[in-house]
Amino acid sequence: MSEDLWTPHALSDPELAIPERGAAGSVTLVIPTFNEAGNIAELLGRLADALPAHLPCEVLFVDDSTDDTPAVIEKAALDLPFPVAVLHRESADGGLGGAVVEGVKRADTDWIVVMDADLQHPPHLVPELVGEGERTGADLVVASRYLPGGSRAGLAGNYRIAVSRGATWLTKGLFPRALRGISDPMSGFFAVRRAVFTADALKPLGYKILLELAVRCRPAEVAEVPFVFQDRHSGESKSGLREGMRFLAHLAALRSAAPLARMIGFGLIGLSGFVPNLFALWLLTHAGMHYLPAEIAANQAGVLWNFALIEGLLFRDRRRHRHWADRVGRFALLANADLLLRIPLIALFVARFGMQVLPATALALVTTFVLRFAATEALVYLPRKTRTARTTRS
Ligand code: GDD
Ligand code: MN
């Protein structure tokens, strides 16, 4: 990825107070932008009005725009009382979430405030978020639309409001402990102490960077401040159906980070594979195929279904180590070996250990399931040993 961290001339102006790095209460505003040229002047103007002179503050835009947003920022930044920088990324890795993580990696102030560029997040709340954190000792202060005094005024239409509420309930239900004290885990407006933000642990997918932070970094103390989600100042939202799908995949990835949870997910996906398996069997036998070859072919339909879900939901971040054809081949081999292994295993349990057929079959099912899960992790999704050893040595 080629990047280019640009700082306007204003920064080298000796007249301008540049905040002392790491000074108490110092703040970096990380603002992700994707084609927001129409919002920059208004945003920076309102920030200049809102930020008290004693608050050491700098603004870092992380930009993936294809329009002239960086040039607009450069122009608007010249007469501001705080430093402004733009990190323009050539490839928008990780989208909005990836942009925020890039910004966080570069910040070395006490606090980081993440906010949108479209003025849906009121700039006058920035000092309040940090102030609330300083006052209460909280590590994370979330601007919430669900507290008394907050609202979703700017969320266009009943449909979006319903989707947003449903997503919030689902998320809170999946992560009751990590999200305790956070009424609005979907908020994109929050202040967090730099020390909490272990950027290396973050693998955000799309928009929900606060969720990622709360689940992976587990800030000890959380506070909230109500806010009214405003209408977009200019331009249009970049979130849509695709973002919704990424959100579900993100939830699955976060929820299945622990090995036991991943094994349960693996089992549930395996069970769901019966549906395409039986459907394919029905199709093939109705088309006149003998049931034995049809069984074998139909099993492959289940295998492909399982593979697609396991790739998309469970091992999303571990796919890079092998080519997809390699992964699908290994996966299918293991899944079919599972069937072959089951019969001799049942025979062993019955003949050698004197078990009844039903418990022997159940035990064989569980055994091959656990074996297959372990083998899939180790043989399909684990980084290749020889390769990593070589690269770390060099
Ligand atoms: N760098 C970068 N790269 N910035 C991006 C990208 C990207 O790929 N996609 C969007 N952004 C920037 C936008 O320019 C804007 O400043 C901010 O991220 C939010 O994008 P919007 O497209 O305006 O999002 P939204 O209004 O639909 O969603 C906002 O509200 C949601 C709550 O309803 C975001 O704050 C979400 O995080 C939040 O959940
Ligand atoms: Mn927006």
Image: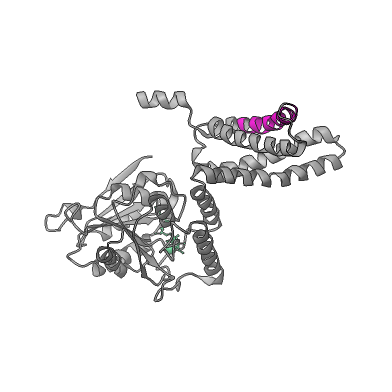
Q: Is residue 112 left or right of residue 381?
A: left
- Toward which corner of the image does residue 284 lie, by quadrant? top right
Q: Residue furthest bottom?
A: 149
> Which quarter of the image is occupied by the N terminus?
top left
Q: Main secondary structure of the magenta part?
A: helix
Question: Where does residue 362 sit, x and y in percent of width and height?
Answer: 70, 39
- Please give the range of residues in magenta: 330-351
Q: Residue furthest right?
A: 288
> Which of the four quarters of the rendered structure image does ligand 1 lie in?
bottom left
Q: Is residue 338 magenta?
A: yes
The residue lying at 54 percent from left, 60 percent from top is 170
- Toward which corner of the image does residue 358 lie, by quadrant? top right
Q: Visible in this render: residue 120?
A: no
Question: Where does residue 243 sit, x and y in percent of width and height?
Answer: 51, 55
The residue lying at 54 percent from left, 35 percent from top is 377
372 w.r.t. 17: above or below: above
Q: Is residue 281 magenta?
A: no
Q: Is residue 70 left or right of residue 365?
A: left
15 w.r.t. 292: above or below: below
The residue lying at 37 percent from left, 60 percent from top is 37
301 w.r.t. 162: above or below: above
In this view, the residue in front, 211 or 160, is 211
Color encoding of the figure: one colour
